[in-house]
Amino acid sequence: AQSVTQPDIHITVSEGASLELRCNYSYGATPYLFWYVQSPGQGLQLLLKYFSGDTLVQGIKGFEAEFKRSQSSFNLRKPSVHWSDAAEYFCAVGAGGTSYGKLTFGQGTILTVHP
Amino acid sequence: EPEVTQTPSHQVTQMGQEVILRCVPISNHLYFYWYRQILGQKVEFLVSFYNNEISEKSEIFDDQFSVERPDGSNFTLKIRSTKLEDSAMYFCASRVGGTPYEQYFGPGTRLTVT
């Protein structure tokens, strides 16, 4: 069964600082990996995705993530955080094969940005 | 830009009552999903729906739950007899057929069972 672990429940950074949110997954085959962001009272917005190819993927809002198969990780990064990035971030893995694409989410990481 | 919509945004119901949560997926999408998020917990898969039938469901999706696509645009989740533990945010999602498995989520319906 697939699973996702986000080790950091809550991260606080200063505006302008760099950011890395960790994600580790468990899946028997090539995973489909996603990062979603959820602002308070809002739905889930897709930030970026990895399916194959280049292991460094670019997303919206200046985010990027790197897939490392050897470490079963898909960490999210941003070089300079803005106050508007404060939200909850979810890593998710999608099954391939005969599955109809259900997503398994991590616990989420709440990002607080200090001015 | 096309988006998934959900109604109502907030539903309050009494324990034992039936509720129907409604979703309008993106029009050319073929796969439809319901997820839920209990306050403070992770987003959990409930059910996937393709070609007018359930394709996969989780252990949470018991006989109290059902889904339907009554026409070409709506996708509904029905809970027959709500329990207190059904209180959660329910998200609808959809995607086009084949790969990639990129799902687009609606804004959610917050269900409060009292």
Image: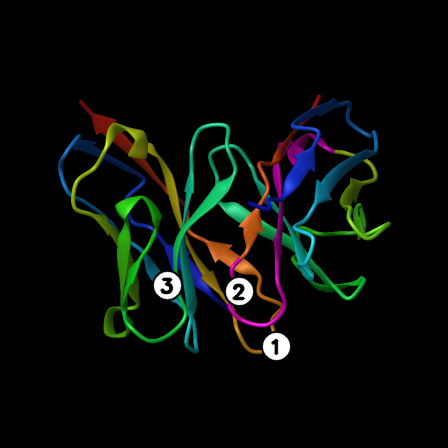
Position of residue B65 relative to residue A86, above or below, is: below
Give the number of the disc on residue A90: none
Q: CA distance from mark 3 to mark 1?
A: 19 Å
Contact, mark 3 vs mark 1 (Cβ under 8 Å): no
Give the number of the disc on residue B101: 2
Disc 3 or disc 1, which is closer to the eye?
A: 1
Q: Based on the picture, tell me whether residue B87 belongs to the magenta stretch.
A: yes
> How busy is the neighbourhood of tag 2: few (under 14 within 10 Å), some, or many (20 plus)?
many
Give the magenta part as a residue range. B83-102
Query: Between residues A84 and A107, which one lies in front from this camera angle?
Result: A84
Q: CA distance from mark 2 to mark 3?
A: 17 Å
Q: How many marks?
A: 3
Residue B52, x across and y down, in percent: 81, 62
Which chain letter matches label 2?
Answer: B
Visual colour scheme: rainbow
Q: Which residue is mark 3?
A: A25
Q: Amino acid at mark 2?
A: Tyr
